Amino acid sequence: MNHTALTGRTAVVTGAASGIGAETARRLAANGARVALLARRADRLKDLAAEIEAGGGTALAVAVDVTDQDSVDAGAARIRAELGRVDLVVNAAGVMLPNPLDDGRIDEWTRMIDTNVTGALRIIRAFTADLVAAAAAGGTADLVDVSSIGAHVTFPNYAVYGATKAALTHLSASLRSELGPRDVRVTNIEPGLTDTELGSHIDNAALGEAGQLGTMFDTIGALSPTDVADLIVYTTSRPRHVNLRHLVILPTHQA
Ligand SMILES: NC(=O)c1ccc[n+]([C@@H]2O[C@H](COP(=O)([O-])OP(=O)(O)OC[C@H]3O[C@@H](n4cnc5c(N)ncnc54)[C@H](OP(=O)(O)O)[C@@H]3O)[C@@H](O)[C@H]2O)c1
């Protein structure tokens, strides 16, 4: 990997408080990008920004709730004021809240749709003009959406999560038809099982980390967040005419 491959780029990474988003931010910064770190837990973001700065990188911690339009607007304004025009956006913020459909957990359905779909759209809305302007000025511009293998593979109890990820996958494909002709690359990444905090919010002991999800980790193993982050760095550091548009990354044992 060329460690200056992303020098001069300005990135926004959502979900940067943990897991795939945090590791992506680290790797983008290590490869020369200036990185805005977005999530709700400000303390986590501050610690990560300090770590990146201590390693010689540039990072800005911006506490943002992607389900709140005012929060996204304020965050975007601050990023532009402090880092300038953004040319790389990674939508990694997400929640996964499985439960039987019969339980009718509209609170969880709403949270997943607001975060995984509308939240990604709020970020896309905030930064698309920057991406288009960066590309028009001759630069490289990327939108990367972190979807899931759950967009294609059905699991009982994961119907709504899978539906949000299918929506994000389709959104990425459609946006590519609008943004590609303007030289903005759109990449949809679908990871399989990855060792992060994602399962820690499951409100069902039989399905959570001490139950079904834990058994999956034991039997098929998992990707590390670094595995996915490396793929994002590789993708965004290609020459500007090369768009890896749809990537599926799975642990080798996951069918
Ligand atoms: N782990 C897997 O097996 C797997 C597989 C396929 C796809 N994915 C996808 O990968 C993405 C990253 O998840 P992860 O696995 O890295 O899990 P994670 O460690 O739980 O990370 C999720 C991140 O999203 C942030 N977030 C959640 N709600 C938010 C909100 N309303 N506003 C702003 N940020 C919010 C969280 O930070 P705060 O709580 O501080 O806001 C956290 O940093 C998700 O979209 C997930 O669906 C994961």
Image (cartoon, helix red, strand yellow):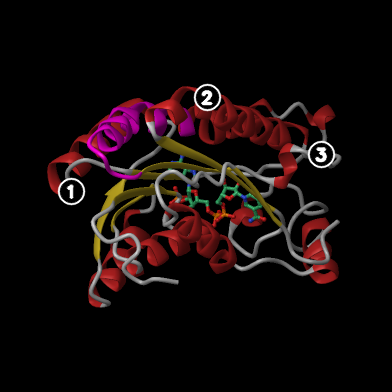
Q: Amino acid at mark 2?
A: Ser
Q: Which quadrant of the structure image shows residue 113? A: top right
- Which residue carries the number 1 mark? 83
Residue at image mark 3: 157
User: Which quadrant would residue 150 be assigned to in this image?
Assistant: top right
Q: Nearer the viewer, residue 86 or 215?
A: 86
Mark 2: few/some/many CA within 10 Å (<14, 14-19, 20+): few
Three-letter amino acid code at disc 1? Leu
* Residue on which disc 2 sits: 177
Q: Amino acid at mark 3?
A: Asn
Seen at 18% across and 40% down, the residue is 80
Front residue of 208 and 218: 218
The part of the chain drawn in magenta is: 120-140
**Label total for image:** 3
Helix, strand or loop status at disc 3: loop
Whole-number angstrom distance, CA of label 1 to CA of label 3? 42 Å
Q: Is residue 160 visible?
A: yes
Q: Quadrant of residue 209?
A: bottom right
